[in-house]
Structure formats: C-alpha cells, structure tokens
C-alpha cells in the first residue's frame, strides 16, 4: 500500500510538499487489480460516486423539489436536469484533482492561496457543510416524526447518535459504508418508483418540463426555487468530499495508471449522478402530479406533502413509503456530510482531530439552530429553514467551483492530467452561469426588501 506522504511524479506547481490524506484511516485501503477485466476494475472504483450522489438527493432536495413541483408543475424539471449535468462535470473535475495531485480540494486551496484567503475559503466551506448538515438533521427529524410520532425536537437530538453509526461502519472497512449507501439509495429509488406510478403524471407535460423556459429567470418566485434546486443539487461540500474519497483506491500512481483511475472514477460518479437525477426528477414529478394538478400550489412543507399523499393518490402505502424514503435520504446524507466536515477542517487548517470528535463538532454546530427553529417555530419554520439552507449552499458554490476549475486546468499543477480545453471551457461556462444566477437572486431579494 502506498504511503500518504509519497509524492506524485509530476507534483510541480505547488508551494509545499503534499500532506497526508485527510482520511488517513481509509487512504488507499481498497485494492485495484492491475491486470483485470474492465468489469472488475469498474467494480473496484465503484463507490465514491455513490457517496457523493447521496448529497444530491438529501432532504434539502426534497424541500425544493416539492415546493417547485407544487407551485409550478413540471416547469422546473429542466433546472433539475441542468443541475445534475453540471454536477456530473464538476464531480469529474473533483475526482481528477484528487487522483492527479494526491490532494483534496481543501488541501489544494490551502497550498495555493495566501493564508487570509485560505482562511476565508475555509469559513465559507464550513458554512456550506453546516447548511448541508442542517438539512440532513431536519429531514431525519421529520422522518422520525412521520414514522414513529417522535416530536421534532427529540428527533433533532437523536440525530447526534448518527455519528456513532458512521464510526462503527468505518471501523469495519470503507466498503461496508459504501454498501450501506448504495442499499439506502435503492430503498429511496424503489419508494419513488411506486409513488411516480401511483401519481399517474401527464407524461407529455413531463417531457415538456425538461425544456428550459424563460419564465424561470423572469419570475422571481420561480428563480428563488430554481436556485434552491441548484444549491441542493450541486453542493459545495461534495467537491471537497469527492477529491478525498477517490484516494481510498490503491491505483497505479504512474501517469497512465492515474489517467485510467480518472476514467473509471468519472464513470462511477456519472452513473451514480444519473441515478440521483432520476430520483430528484421523480420527487418533483410526484409533487407536480399530486399537488399542482389538484390545485394545491402552496405545498412547501414535507409534513404537508406526507399528509396529503394518501388522500390524493388513494393509496395508503404512499405516505409510509414517502417517510421511509425520507429517513433513508437523511441517513445517507448524514454519513457523507460528516465526512466532508472532517475533510474541510483538516484540509484547510491542517488540524488533526480524532474522527469522532470532528464529526461530533460538525453535528452539534448544526443541531443548535435546528433546535431553536424547531422549538420556537415548529414544522413551518423547519420547512423554511430547509429551503433557505439550499439557497445558502448555492451562494457558497462559486467559492468552491472557481478554485476547482482553476486548479484542474493548470498544467503546472496537474501535468499531463490537466483538463482538456473543451472540458475547461464547459466548466467555466457553468461557473459563470452559477454566478449570474446568484447575482440575480441577490438583486431580486434586495429589491423586494427595499420595496
């Protein structure tokens, strides 16, 4: 097994030698056969993409997709598709960075930027991790309330125990954690296949919804939800996470070996994110077919959606499966969110904390605002907090995407594994789109506030 202190052969363009992995307990712990069939190699690399993909179907996605589907029907399906296509490109760049340089995105930022800039990027990344964790906590608490009648405040407290589950799985081996993630994704997918079939959507309108509409930009209310969907889908913490997770594979560190690793890691994340696209689209389709089609255009709370599903669909199992899928979604996202928190802190600050302590800190930071909102504002407050957390994530996104695209296009840092010009152009175009949409959102929000 390779040492995490070893240098990549073309590790030039960086100011400092490469540091140890931010996940040393699982660094290069999964063997990759050097001479094997394509299928075996794909299986060896399969896993990190699914851990990343769960962040694209977390409870924050549910809140924005339900709000968008109930208010605007199928119109925002084009945003869901665009956001997932952007995610596929950006996650491929994240994997490329980790494999080519042996650094995750947080470590790369710390090496490249001055200390004040790096510190500001760390604060923004921590804010994104906390916003993500907040959505996961609220989603899990809502699911526990719907399934077992546990009060929301107690559900928030129970989520702290998720940290123990993560540590137990990681102690048994990273493959166990990946297997749990994939299993829960299949549960979510199965539940929504049933819900889509039961809701009987108008498929012609579904197909039309995947065609972008100018109204998305001109309608401030629609744009707010659209940017929330963008923030819930292309999540900043996933870019840090993926660049570290790909280093759990013990691939050949020669240039051809790393090029092959990039190819298989990209296949892994693309397949996983296409599955996430189907699930995200299914959530919005169910909301549009069930609520918008029946005149219920103000369904923005997950609890209300759960309550109304059975009467509208005439299927008693619909509400239960909805809650089961929500619980699976919250648990899945919890695992990856806390891993991202560890990567961000250790990568930016070069601080080594015991994994249990770092993950407990991440969870407790998010628990406090969740408890305050739950106790004082109840279910409606948690719903608004869910959507707001996704908009915050979208506003943080450029601060992770710009360094990622910059590093992966730099031949001095990446050597022969730098992104080809066509991929760099696509990535910069996506970055510009994200920035323009965020500026538009800030302008509309400020204008509404002043008027």
Image (cartoon, rainbow, N blue to C red):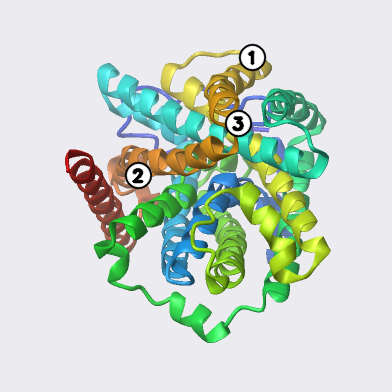
Question: Split into 4 quadrants, where in the image is the N terminus?
Answer: top right
Q: Earlier in the sequence, mark 2 or mark 3?
A: 3
Q: Earlier in the sequence, mark 1 or mark 3?
A: 3
Question: Split into 4 quadrants, where in the image is the C terminus?
Answer: top left
Residue 391 appears left or right of 58: left
Say the numbered circle drawn on residue 259: none
* Residue at (49% x, 63% y) in the render: 297
Whether residue 41 is visible here, answered yes or no, is no
Residue 439 appears left or right of 63: left
**Residue 385 location, x and y as percent?**
49, 37
Please say if 83 is above or below 354.
below
**Residue 282 location, x and y as percent?**
61, 66
User: Decide: marks 1, 3 in contact (CB < 8 A)?
Assistant: no
* Residue at (55% x, 69% y) in the render: 288
The residue carrying pointer 2 sits among few (fewer than 14), some (14 to 19) or many (20 or more) residues within 10 Å by Cα, namely many
Q: Nearer the viewer, residue 9 or 30?
A: 30
Furthest residue toward bottom: 204
Circle 3 SS class = helix
Q: Nearer the viewer, residue 433 or 197?
A: 197
Circle 2 SS class = helix
| Residue underneath mark 1 | 357
| Residue underneath mark 3 | 339
Say the numbered circle drawn on residue 401: 2
* Residue at (79% x, 40% y) in the render: 176
């Amino acid at each position: 097994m390779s040492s995490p202190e070893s240098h990549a052969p073309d590790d030039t363009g960086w100011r400092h030698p490469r540091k140890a992995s931010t996940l040393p307990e699982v660094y290069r712990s999964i063997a990759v056969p050097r001479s094997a069939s394509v299928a075996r190699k794909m299986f060896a690399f399969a896993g990190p993409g699914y851990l990343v993909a769960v962040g694209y179907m977390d409870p924050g996605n549910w809140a924005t997709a339900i709000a968008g589907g109930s208010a605007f029907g199928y119109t925002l399906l084009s945003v869901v598709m665009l956001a997932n296509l952007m995610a596929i490109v950006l996650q491929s760049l994240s994997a490329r960075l980790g494999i080519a340089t042996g650094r995750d995105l947080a470590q790369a930022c710390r090496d490249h930027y001055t200390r004040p800039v790096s510190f500001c990027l760390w604060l923004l990344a921590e804010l994104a991790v906390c916003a993500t964790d907040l959505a996961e906590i609220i989603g899990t608490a809502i699911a526990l309330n719907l399934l077992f009648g546990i009060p929301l405040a107690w559900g928030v407290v129970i989520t702290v125990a998720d940290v123990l589950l993560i540590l137990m799985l990681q102690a048994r081996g990273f493959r166990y954690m990946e297997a749990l993630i994939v299993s829960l994704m299949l549960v979510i997918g199965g539940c929504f296949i049933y819900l889509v079939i039961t809701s009987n959507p108008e498929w012609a309108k579904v197909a039309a919804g995947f065609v972008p509409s100018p109204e998305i930009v001109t309608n401030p209310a629609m744009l707010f939800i659209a940017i929330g969907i963008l923030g819930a889908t292309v999540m900043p913490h996933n870019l840090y996470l993926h660049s570290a997770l790909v280093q759990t594979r013990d691939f050949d560190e020669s240039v051809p070996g790393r090029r092959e690793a990039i190819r298989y890691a990209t296949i892994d994340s693309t397949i996983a994110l296409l599955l996430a696209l189907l699930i995200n689209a299914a959530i919005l389709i169910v909301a549009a077919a069930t609520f918008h089609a029946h005149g219920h255009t103000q369904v923005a709370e997950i609890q209300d959606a759960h309550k109304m599903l059975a009467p509208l669909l005439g299927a008693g199992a619909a509400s239960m499966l909805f809650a089961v899928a929500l619980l699976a979604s919250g648990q899945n996202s919890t695992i990856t969110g806390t891993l991202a928190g560890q990567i961000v802190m250790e990568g930016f600050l070069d601080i080594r904390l015991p994994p249990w302590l770092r993950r407990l800190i991440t969870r407790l930071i998010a628990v406090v605002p969740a408890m305050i909102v739950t106790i004082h504002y109840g279910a409606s407050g948690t719903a608004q907090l869910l959507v707001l957390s996704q908009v915050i994530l979208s506003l943080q996104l450029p601060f992770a995407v710009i360094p990622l695209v910059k590093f992966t296009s730099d031949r001095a840092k990446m050597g022969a594994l730098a992104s080809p010009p066509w991929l760099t152009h696509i990535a910069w175009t996506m970055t510009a789109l994200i920035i323009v949409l965020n500026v538009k959102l800030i302008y509309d929000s400020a204008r509404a506030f002043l008027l």
